[in-house]
Amino acid sequence: MIGAVFLDVGETLVNESLMWASLGARAGLEPHVVWAGLGAAVARGEEHWRTWELLGVDRPEPASAGLEDAELYADAQPCLHRLRADGYFIGLAGNVGRGLGPVVEHFGLDVDWAASSSELGVEKPSPAFFERLLEVAGRPAAEVAYVGDRIDNDVAPARAAGMLAVHVRRGPWGYLQRGAGIQIDSLDELPAVLGGA
Ligand SMILES: [Mg+2]
C-alpha cells in the first residue's frame, strides 16, 4: 500500500510552455523553433539546456529568477488536495538549479516536504537521489511512489529503486519518451492509481 508520494515539478505540476517561449524570445527565436530544438535535444537523449547549442544561439538568461512565466497545470492543485485528503505524505523533488521553497510559496502548494536537486546535492537519474526520498519517507520503497514526465530521469530510476513509478504523459519528454511504468494523461488519474497499487 502506497503511503508516500513524491512528485517531479517541471511538466508534472508546472507547465513550462510560457517559460520556454519567453526564453526563446530573448534569444530572438519564434516559439516553434524553440520547440524543434527541444525535440532535437530529447531525441538525442540530451539535457534541456542543449537546446540552445543545437539551435546555435547563446543560452538566454531569464528576465528574472522569478516565477512569472511558470504556471501550474489545472489538475495540480486538485490532485494535491485529494492526496492530502487521502492521507499521503506528499513530497516535491525535481532537478532544479535553485531551492523549491519559492515555488511552494508562490503557488501555495500544500506539501509535507520539498527539495530540489541543488538542495539535495544530487540530481536525477542518480540512484542516490531516490535513496534520499526513501529516507525522507521513512518507508520501504514498495510503499513510495514517484510521479514524473520523463522515462529517463523519473520513471526508470524510480522503478530501479523499487518505487511505484507513474509516468505523466505531457510536456516534450512525456510524449516522446515511452517505457515501463504506469502511464497517466492527467494528475486527475493519480489518486486512483495510488489507491489501487
Ligand atoms: Mg519534469
Image (spheres, rainbow, N blue to C red):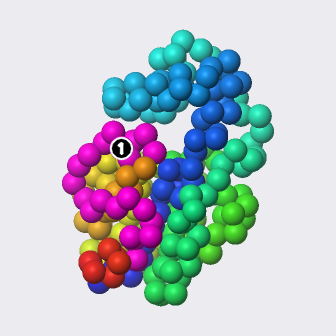
The residue carrying mark 1 is 175
Outermost residue, left side: 180
Does the magenta-highlighted stretch encompass residue 72? Answer: no
Q: Residue at x 69, y 63 (%)?
A: 107
In the depicted view, which residue is nearer to us: 9 or 115?
Answer: 9
Residue shown at 34% from the left, 57% from the top: 167
Q: Is residue 135 visible?
A: no
Quadrant (top left/top right/bottom left/bottom right) for the C terminus: bottom left
150 vs 7: above or below: above
Residue 34 figure quarter = top right
Q: In this view, does 24 lie to the left or right of 134?
A: right
Q: Can residue 19 be seen in this view?
A: yes
Q: What stretch is highlighted in magenta?
A: 171-191
Give amino acid for label 1: Tyr
Give the residue at x 59% y 28%: 31
Residue 175 magenta? yes
Q: Which residue is drawn at 64% across and 69% down?
A: 109
Q: What element carries label 1?
A: helix
Crowd around label 1: few <14 · some 14–19 · many ≥20 (10 Å): few
